Amino acid sequence: MDNSRTYAPGQLGRLFAAVTASAAFMSAIPIATAANPVPLAQMAGQWKGSGWASRATGAARESVRCRLKAKYSAKTRKLSLSGKCASTNGTFTLLGHIADYSNSNKLTGRWVNPRGIGSMNIAGSRKGNRLTFLFDAKDKQTNRKTAYRTIWDLRNNGFSLNTGLSAGPSNALGQIDFKR
């Protein structure tokens, strides 16, 4: 896999729309433990995030800001998300959901970015206060799939999102810190 991927204008926003959407589901109230699965019901609410993103690993950083709203359904055990993020390349809409499984550290979800990379399934797991999600995204112009990894480090007052390519020694593509 080529880790030196570059992005055309606007692609950065499309990439981070999918990544940031998944992050909005992960607050830390309360902190997750092995005996206490991620409490999706308590993750509902409004979130603000800010940080940086780059077009490729090692490239210049751009400022990113997000506003997200999460709603929980006890019937389906799903947390749904909608929101908007902005970078110097413009704004983008976020839509998606995440589901948990009782007595398990596994999470699954689906993210949708209408203007960007489209729809994708994600799979995740929890180890302590760290949630790791993996997903593949297909570039609409080149039709090439790229594997990504997003890691959330949970805190009592929010969470930090780190995103990068899932392979390679220097794979960082961004970091966004969220709080209520």
Image (cartoon, rainbow, N blue to C red):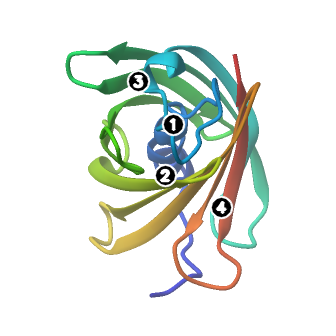
Query: At 62% across and 51% down in the image, what residue appears?
Result: 128
Please name the residue that numbered disc 2 is placed on.
15
Q: Nearest to the eye among marks 2 and 1: give it.
A: 1
Please name the residue that numbered disc 3 is placed on.
81
Q: Left or right: 50 with respect to 98?
A: right
Asked if one can make out residue 69 in the rendered structure from this viewpoint, the answer is no
Q: Quadrant of the N terminus?
A: bottom left
- Seen from the viewer's position, the closer of residues 54 and 77 is 77
Please name the residue that numbered disc 4 is placed on.
173
Above or below — where is 151 with respect to 7?
above
Q: Earlier in the sequence, mark 1 or mark 3?
A: 1
Please name the residue that numbered disc 1 is placed on.
36
Asked if one can make out residue 71 in the rendered structure from this viewpoint, the answer is yes
Query: At 45% across and 55% down in the image, what residue appears?
Result: 125
Query: In what element is the residue under mark 1?
Result: loop
Q: Earlier in the sequence, mark 2 or mark 1?
A: 2
Question: For the residue carrying disc 2, how many other residues have a C-alpha within 10 Å: few (<14), some (14-19), or many (20+)?
Answer: many
Q: CA distance from mark 2 to mark 3?
A: 17 Å
Q: Earlier in the sequence, mark 2 or mark 4?
A: 2
Q: Nearest to the eye among marks 1 and 3: give it.
A: 1
Point out residue 50 in the picture as x, y percentages from the top left corner.
74, 33
Q: CA distance from mark 1 to mark 3?
A: 22 Å
Point out residue 159 in the picture as x, y percentages from the top left corner.
69, 36
Question: For the residue carrying disc 4, how many other residues have a C-alpha within 10 Å: few (<14), some (14-19), or many (20+)?
Answer: many
Query: In what element is the residue under mark 2?
Result: helix
What amino acid type should be assigned to the residue bearing mark 1?
Asn
Query: In what element is the residue under mark 3?
Result: strand
Q: Quadrant of the C terminus?
A: top right
Q: CA distance from mark 4 to mark 3?
A: 22 Å
What amino acid type should be assigned to the residue bearing mark 2?
Leu
